[in-house]
Amino acid sequence: MDLIKNGNKVLFVWGGNVTDQLEKIVNELKTKCEVIVENIERVKMASYANSTFDIILSNYLGTYDSEHTTEVLGHFVKLIKPNGKLIVRNSKTDGFKSDLVLAGYVNVEQQSDGCFVAQKPNYEVGSVAKLSLTPKSKETVAKVWKLDDTEEDDLINPDDLLDEADKEMPDPSSLRVCGTTGKRKACKDCSCGLAEELGGEAPKNEIQKSSCGSCYLGDAFRCATCPYLGMPAFKPGEKIQITDNLMKADL
């Protein structure tokens, strides 16, 4: 009772039947503050405005006629003024402190007489505050890329990369194959025909083969895009001359 000051507005919440002890405590409180008595089952139906009471006393007589669920505790914190207090008794003490914290209370303490005293924070439930986010200055951003090493690094002079001999145009004769002897020489695995030319052999022309291998049999064996379509059958490897009109579109 020492927490209740003169002029406070108090909500006295009880459960069960009205007893002489209840009336006695209420009358004592009314001598120094404004007291409203309400049954715990009808607190929500009473439609009290938020932040109405300085202190809420619930189950103070210790009869444990009702349990304080998280929903009930959350409704109480809305009715209490900022920095106001809830003084409550609960049959279940294990974990009840955590229930009060989850409901939004701070500075939760358990008194020697078994009462829990919890305080509402110094702000309303659901309050918002504008955060002032100061943008970083361009100077700060520039410092991120500033090297700590202030010593100048030695850079290679680009004029020293090439000497005068590198700048001279090469002799075309030296660009030939085997420029040291002046003789033409075929590369290993030559495929351009130079090896056959130097050896006096003419390059061998392989017999052209179609992708399907059946073009020479006639139109019945030719694809729709076959260039020989419409031409008579011929022998495998025979050179076929395709006329210009066959290479033109019909349209």
Image: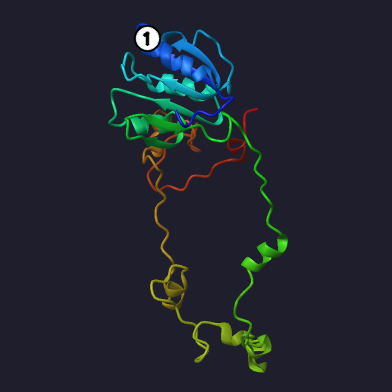
Residue 174 point in image, percent of width and height: 57, 87
Q: Quadrant of residue 92?
A: top left
Residue occupying the point 38% across, 71% down: 189
Q: Quadrant of the C terminus?
A: top right
Res 240 seen here: yes
Residue occupying the point 43% across, 66% down: 203
Amino acid type at circle 1 is: Asp
Res 168 seen here: no
Residue occupying the point 52% across, 20% down: 10
Up-down: is 78 above or below 200? above
Residue situated in front as seen by the camera: 22 or 55:
22
Residue 124 point in image, percent of width and height: 58, 29
Per the image, the residue denoted by label 1 is 20
Residue furthest right in the image: 138
Up-down: is 75 above or below 112? above
Rendering colour mode? rainbow
Residue occupying the point 61% across, 75% down: 147
Disc 1 residue crowd, few under 14, some 14–19, many 20+, Cα 10 Å = few
Q: Quadrant of residue 63?
A: top left
Tell me: 64 left or right of 48. Answer: left
Up-down: is 97 above or below 200? above
Q: How many marks?
A: 1
Residue 109 point in image, percent of width and height: 39, 36
